[in-house]
Image (cartoon, rainbow, N blue to C red):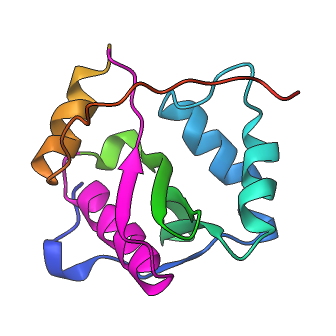
Amino acid sequence: MPFPSALFPPTRPARDTDVTALAALWERCALTRPWNDPVTDIAFARKGPNSEVLVIEQDGKICASVMVGHDGHRGWVYYLAVEPDLQRGGLGRHIMDEAQSWLRAKGAWKMHLMIRRSNGAVRTFYEKLGFSESDVVVLSKSLT
C-alpha cells in the first residue's frame, strides 16, 4: 500500500543492525551482482564522511534505501531500493529528495547516477525526477 505523500517516515543513516535487512532488500529489488557483495558495499559507504546509506523504515522494517556519496564536487547515488510492494507510491522520489539534500549539505554541486541501458523502467523514473543522459562514456577498471 503506497504511503500518503505527506506522511513519509523519517529518513535516517543505516546502522550496524540494518546490514542484513538492507542486503536482502537490495536482492529483492535485483540491485546486486555477484561481483559486488552488498555487505561489503554497505560497510565501505558507512565508514567514511563522504558517503552514507540512508534508510526509511515502516513498522520496524527497512522499506527504502539509497547509498549516497561525493568526491567534493560531484555527488553519486547508488542502490536506490524500495520494497517491491511499496513501489509507485512516491517513496522512491522521497528518498531521492533525501539523497539530494544530503549531497547539498555536503557541498556537492552536481548529482550523478548510473543505470543499466536495459532498465527502461528505472530510466523513466529518473527522467521524471529531472535526470537526463550525459554525453559521457563511463570507463572502469577493477582494482581487486
Please give the name of the residue rendered at 23% of the width and 32% of the height, measured from the top-left corner. 123
Image vertical order of residue 85 relative to residue 136, above or below:
below
Q: Where in the figure is residue 112, as x and y percent of width and height?
A: 39, 50
Q: Where in the figure is residue 46, as x and y percent of width and height?
A: 74, 66
Q: Is residue 104 within the magenta segment?
A: yes
Q: Where in the figure is residue 121, as x and y percent of width and height?
A: 22, 27
Q: Nearer the viewer, residue 122 or 141?
A: 141
Image vertical order of residue 53 relative to residue 41, above or below:
below
Q: Is residue 54 left or right of residue 24?
A: left
Q: Is residue 101 left or right of residue 20?
A: left
Q: Where in the figure is residue 27, as x and y percent of width and height?
A: 59, 32
Q: Nearer the viewer, residue 120 or 62?
A: 120
Image vertical order of residue 12 relative to residue 55, above or below:
below
- Residue 79 in view here: yes
The quadrant in which the C terminus is found is: top right
Please give the name of the residue rendered at 75% of the width and 50% of the height, measured from the top-left corner. 20
- Residue 64 in view here: no
Q: Nearer the viewer, residue 123 or 93?
A: 123
Q: Residue furthest right?
A: 144
Q: Is residue 57 within the magenta segment?
A: no
Image vertical order of residue 105 relative to residue 13, above or below:
below
Quadrant of the image occupied by residue 6: bottom left
Quadrant of the image occupied by residue 18: bottom right
- Residue bounds of the magenta highlight: 88-117
Quadrant of the image occupied by residue 111: bottom left
Please give the name of the residue rendered at 19% of the width and 46% of the height, measured from the top-left corner. 88
